[in-house]
């Protein structure tokens, strides 16, 4: 008798496959499933698309677990889809980048500026922990086109750095001597951001396999789940600590049920990990990690100084002003990041170096154009819209908003130049530049925040970033001269 497996639930399907393997009759499917399979009206009835998609994914996941290996299953999604890569990378990056402003708006509307400021500060320090967990490996991983390091080695490296970041977060809360409420907020937010850090290595694997759109889908689902759960719990409880913990749990669920299985199912099985590869990743990527962590510490330093000098509500004001800056970074990021593998291939061919330079100049022009467009947008409708969303009059911060837009263009240029230096495998040379910028922002923030408050935080932020960009441009020119001299020692 032929079974209609399409209408059976995933557990019934798995039971049938288990029986076929053993050569024994299968236990009858559930009465409801059997009735649905045989009833003409039920056969004509189609499940909603989302329910059908979830059911198919759950069935595939259960079958793979039953077979004993996710990485040995047949791939189902295509690679080399540039249009999908751009669309889903744009969506995923945008939704992820919008997480802080959206969650801050929700927190402000439902809990007030003071409590939202506490959440905002926890989120900022959580971002530092995420970058510590990332350890600067993503760009190195996706440009490892010859797979000199096994993906299993990348995984061991990432889980190790995430564990270290978790310890760092606990130590930070202990040193700050946070009260239980603030400590609970930090715990939930830190869990979410550490999951972001761990998920990055699996999404990097998908990008390495030229399936960046799947990484974008994973990122979108995780961020969307976090938005939904945080909002629902805050709406019901009006307790940011409870909502933060629920948000962290939702992020863990998305990692276990979507991100990890998707990466293992849709990429080739990796060879076994080797300790020397893991150690080599820590060694080679330390300059990237140190530079990236320092860069984000530079970004966060004005907020950390504000915590000790100004009320928590100033954290919300700073983050709201920062949103246009972040928008510029997101737009530039989704333009150039899908091209990193292509840029690495172009650079590997010495005859295409001029084309490489033209791409860099084109990106600089794009950064200037995007920054100008965002500035015009904020000058017209952006500031009134921000006031409406937060329920706070931001007209008083108009000048600070313009400074933040300029800072956004500067940071986007820094981020792009840093990625280029990584492609050139000269990332160790920028470490001292970030140290200099860190010293500058710390000194400026301590002086200006205590003198002129929020304005001092914004001014010190922009000044330190401009200083870092100048240093990075000079260093990039030195790197190119050194490479040219290595190729032709007799050139002047």
Image: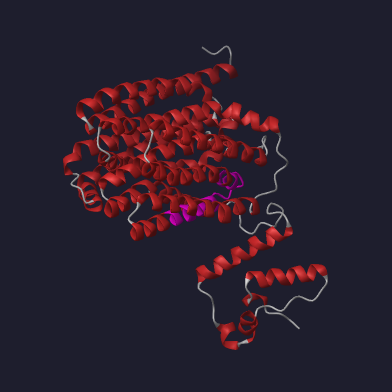
Q: In which quadrant of the rendered view does residue 401 lie?
A: top left
Q: In which quadrant of the rendered view does residue 184 lie?
A: top left
Horizontal relation, residue 341 to residue 116: left or right: right
In this view, the residue farthest toward the front is 180
Query: The N terminus is located in which quarter?
Result: bottom right
**Residue shown at 47%/27% (left/top)?**
291
Estimate the x, y position of residue 225 in percent, counting from the top left.
45, 56
Estimate the x, y position of residue 65 in percent, counting from the top left.
68, 58
Dominant SS of magenta comes to helix
Q: Nearer the viewer, residue 249 or 357?
A: 249
Estimate the x, y position of residue 372 in percent, counting from the top left.
28, 40
What is the span of residues highlighted in magenta in the rendered image? 203-226
| Colour mode of the rendering | secondary structure
Horizontal relation, residue 147 to residue 442: left or right: right
Q: How many numbered callouts?
A: 0
Q: Is residue 63 above or below residue 359?
A: below
Estimate the x, y position of residue 224 in percent, counting from the top left.
44, 56
Q: Nearer the viewer, residue 247 or 153?
A: 247
Horizontal relation, residue 25 to residue 112: left or right: right
Q: Is residue 2 above or below residue 392?
A: below
Q: Is residue 341 above or below residue 13?
A: above
Whether residue 436 is visible here, answered yes or no, is: yes
**Residue shown at 48%/54% (left/top)?**
250
Does 409 appear in magenta?
no
Q: In which quadrant of the rendered view does residue 333 lie?
A: top left
Does 222 appear in magenta?
yes
Whether residue 79 is visible here, answered yes or no, is: no
Q: Nearer the viewer, residue 179 or 73?
A: 179
């Amino acid at each position: 008798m032929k079974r209609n497996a399409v209408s059976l639930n995933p557990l019934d399907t798995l039971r049938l496959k288990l029986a076929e393997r053993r050569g024994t009759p299968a236990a009858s499917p559930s009465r409801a499933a059997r009735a649905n399979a045989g009833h003409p009206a039920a056969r004509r009835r189609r499940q909603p698309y989302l329910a059908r998609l979830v059911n198919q994914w759950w069935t595939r996941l259960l079958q793979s677990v039953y077979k004993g290996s996710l990485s040995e299953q047949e791939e189902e999604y295509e690679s080399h889809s540039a249009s999908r890569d751009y669309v889903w990378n744009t969506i995923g990056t945008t939704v992820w980048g919008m997480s802080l402003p959206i969650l801050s708006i929700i927190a402000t509307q439902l809990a007030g500026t003071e409590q939202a400021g506490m959440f905002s500060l926890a989120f900022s320090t959580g971002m530092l922990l995420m970058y510590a967990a990332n350890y600067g490996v993503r760009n190195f991983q996706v440009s490892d086109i010859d797979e000199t390091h096994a993906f299993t080695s990348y995984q061991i490296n990432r889980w190790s750095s995430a564990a270290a970041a978790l310890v760092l977060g606990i130590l930070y809360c202990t040193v700050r001597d946070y009260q239980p409420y603030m400590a609970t907020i930090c715990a939930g937010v830190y869990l979410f951001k550490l999951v972001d850090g761990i998920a990055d290595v699996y999404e990097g694997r998908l990008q390495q396999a030229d399936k960046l759109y799947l990484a974008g889908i994973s990122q979108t689902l995780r961020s969307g789940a976090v938005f939904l759960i945080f909002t629902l719990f805050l709406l019901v409880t009006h307790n940011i600590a409870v909502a933060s913990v629920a948000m962290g749990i939702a992020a863990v669920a998305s990692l276990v049920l979507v991100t990890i299985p998707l990466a293992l199912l849709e990429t080739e099985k990796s060879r076994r990990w080797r300790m020397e590869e893991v150690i080599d990743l820590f060694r080679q990527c330390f300059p990237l990690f140190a530079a990236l962590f320092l860069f984000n510490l530079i970004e966060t330093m004005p907020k950390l100084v504000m915590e000790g000098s100004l009320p928590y509500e100033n954290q919300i004001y700073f983050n709201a002003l920062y949103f246009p800056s972040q928008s510029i970074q997101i737009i530039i990021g989704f333009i150039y990041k899908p091209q990193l593998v292509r840029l690495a291939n172009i650079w590997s061919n010495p005859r295409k170096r001029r084309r490489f330079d033209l791409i860099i100049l084109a990106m600089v022009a794009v950064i200037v154009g995007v920054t100008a467009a965002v500035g015009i947008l904020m000058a017209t409708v952006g500031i009134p819209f921000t006031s409406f969303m937060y329920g706070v009059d931001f007209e008083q911060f108009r000048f600070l908003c313009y400074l933040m837009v300029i800072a956004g263009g500067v940071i986007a240029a820094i981020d792009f130049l840093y990625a280029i230096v990584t492609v050139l495998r000269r990332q160790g040379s920028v470490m001292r530049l970030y140290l200099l910028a860190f010293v500058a922002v710390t000194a400026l923030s301590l002086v200006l925040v205590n003198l002129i408050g929020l304005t001092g935080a914004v001014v010190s932020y922009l000044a330190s970033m401009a200083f870092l960009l100048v240093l990075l441009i000079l260093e990039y020119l030195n790197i190119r001269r050194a490479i040219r001299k290595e190729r032709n020692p007799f050139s002047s």
